[in-house]
Amino acid sequence: MKYVCSIVKTSKYAVSIGGDSAEIVERPLGGLSALVVDGQGSGKAAKTLSAALAGKASGLITDGIRDGAVARAVHDWLFAQKHGRVSASISIISAAADTGTMVITRCGNCPVFVLTPGGVLDFSAPVAPLGFYRFTRPQVDQVALEEGVLAVTFSDGVLGAGRGARNMEPEAWMEEIARWYKEGMGVQALAEKILGRALALDDNRPRDDMTVLVLGMVREPTDGIRRLQVEYPAR
């Protein structure tokens, strides 16, 4: 078995620089952490903010800091820098090999769905975002990490796609994603499917930056080699 992670993202229509940032980090005690940061607004300013937060979070995870403490630390930094005037959301999903658990850490309205052979676990209740309130505390949950467990999260550009009559509530997204999972869709295919659905709801002109992250444990042949492949469109 092996851990597999896929992140797909696109920018708001007609905006060259997206405000979302995403990172994948190798945990010092084994396993992977992946995170999505959605900065307030869009464009260059939002990207500068989200990249700073994602970089700080990644560095702390690499240092062995627990995910909940990581989220608190980046919140404290943002609050100190912007004095409660700027917010961001963060979702950290970790496949922690040392504890055999999947750890889900959230600040903001971005949902996380954990897909298991026995059903779907819904972590979509809104949590206070980073940056606004002095004593914001992240929501931290853990589930057993085993074969077939996949976690999905996405930024609010996906959540808000198709605003109005076509907009899908978190429950509707959960049902769709669970159906695709039951059809045997893999990690990469599932991430692409979610992004494609969101783009279709916005008539392929996304009204906000969109990022989808899927991470899980799958039973696939492994040769012991770690691989990371990235595709980035040239301007």
Image: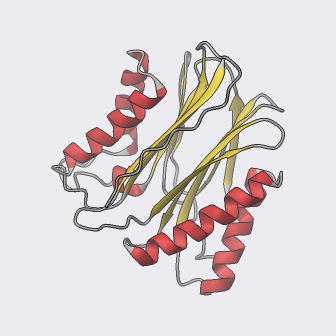
Quadrant in the picture for the N terminus? top right
Q: Is residue 146 above or below residue 40?
A: above
Task: Pinpoint residue 78: horizontal percent, then vertical percent.
Answer: 64, 77
Q: Is residue 200 above or below residue 100?
A: below
The residue shown at (58%, 19%) is: 148
Is residue 56 in view?
A: yes
**Position of residue 148 in the picture relative to residue 224 (left or right):** left
Task: Pinpoint residue 109: horizontal percent, then vertical percent.
Answer: 49, 57
Task: Pinpoint residue 142: horizontal percent, then vertical percent.
Answer: 71, 37
The residue shown at (60%, 74%) is: 131
- Residues 112 and 39: in front is 39
Work out which residue is located at the far front of the displayed protein and give it.
Answer: 234
Quadrant in the picture for the C terminus? bottom left
The residue shown at (83%, 32%) is: 98
Q: Quadrant of residue 104?
A: top right
Q: Is residue 39 above or below residue 178?
A: below
**Position of residue 184 in the picture relative to residue 32 (left or right):** left
All told, the count of numbered labels is 0
